Amino acid sequence: MSSLFKSEQGKSEILQLYDAKLESLNIDYEYITVQTSFGHTHIIAAGDPANPPVILVHGSNGCAPIALETYANLHKEYRVYAIDVLAQPNKSAETRLSMKDDSYGKWMNEIITDLKIESVTMAGFSFGGLIILKTLENDETRIKEVYLSAPAYIVNGNPLKAIFKVFIPMKRYMKTKKVKYVEKFLSHLFTDRDEFAIEFLSKVFLEFKMDFTPVPVIDTKKAQAINTPITIFAAKHDILFPGQKMLKRAKKIFPSLNESSLLEHSKHVQNRAQNKVIEKEIMNQAKAAQISAITIQ
């Protein structure tokens, strides 16, 4: 199988940025490699192993250090497992799975089995939301609750907006290598400017074979069969997965929808303040569980 990285030099440069981002977080961590039937999966683990487990799943064209940075304090309350998603510009295998079947769900449940963890909290952004929902479809018995931020797989936005605001500027960048085109389309996706994202994605768009497969939406019957508590943070100004449209459908199809919030001033990618709101909600659940355990004892 040919590599998704277009050159060894390009791969090296992308992974150097990966390592630099991880080191900039200034946290204690360890690497874990899980061998799955879909290929090896690279994981960054942080936090006390005695703490309850949380799995973080990054978005498309991303990597585990970005997920760790997004919710930078979770390792204080949880044992965090930040997953490098397969076939993305990171350190996992380059096996590209189908979004139409249950491959992503099987893959994630193999990881959970290998890690020997139970009562797992999952948190994912964008494409990571699709992976989490696929996990619940496949086998939700070991999942305690999930938090989805601007998730894929519930609704899709206007494809013409995506073409003109994202796809065309991306193609112009790939042709001209002028960073202004990266800055242009990221301004439509990111609530606040992100210098690392500009640097990382500028390299990824030139040196990595991206997946442009249309994102499907979850079948109503499959959604209604999910029992795991779901919390959704939708972004009002998200051109990929519009927030108001998402919450309207989510309330209809998910009987286990625990809570839903519309981030009024958010584009597809949340800023630091918005991520802190989401992080606080996840951490509050961990603290509540600890208090409950102490009370029972």
Image (cartoon, helix red, strand yellow):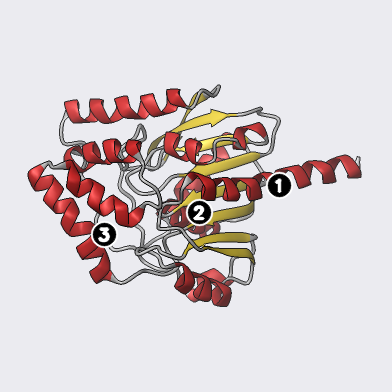
Residue 213's tag is 3
Please provide percent x and percent y for residue 226. Answer: 59, 65
Q: Are marks 1 and 2 in contact (CB under 8 Å)?
A: no
Please provide percent x and percent y for residue 166. Answer: 24, 58
Secondary structure under tag 3 reads loop
Q: CA distance from mark 2 to mark 3?
A: 18 Å
- Residue type, numbered disc 1: Asn
In the image, 184 versus 28, the foreground residue is 184
Question: Is 199 positioned to the left or the right of 20 in the image?
Answer: left
- Is residue 4 at all visible to an observer of this figure? no
- Residue type, numbered disc 3: Thr
Question: Is 193 positioned to the left or the right of 148 in the image?
Answer: left
- Residue type, numbered disc 2: Ile
Q: Residue at x 50, y 63 (%)?
A: 264
Label 2 Cα neighbours within 10 Å, binned few <14 / some 14-19 / many ≥20: many
Mark sitting earlier along the chain (1/3):
3
Mark sitting earlier along the chain (2/3):
2
Q: Are marks 1 and 3 in contact (CB under 8 Å)?
A: no
In the image, 217 versus 97, the foreground residue is 217
Residue 284's tag is 1
Please provide percent x and percent y for residue 232. Answer: 56, 61
Q: Which residue is mark 2?
A: 132
Quarter assignment of residue 193: top left
Secondary structure under tag 1 reads helix
Look at the image and tell me in which quarter the N terminus lies. Answer: top left
Question: Is 1 positioned to the left or the right of 142 in the image?
Answer: left
Question: Is 49 positioned to the left or the right of 189 in the image?
Answer: right
Q: Residue at x 47, y 40 (%)?
A: 67
Look at the image and tell me in which quarter the C terminus lies. Answer: top right
Q: CA distance from mark 1 to mark 2?
A: 21 Å
Closer to viewer: mark 1 or mark 3: 1
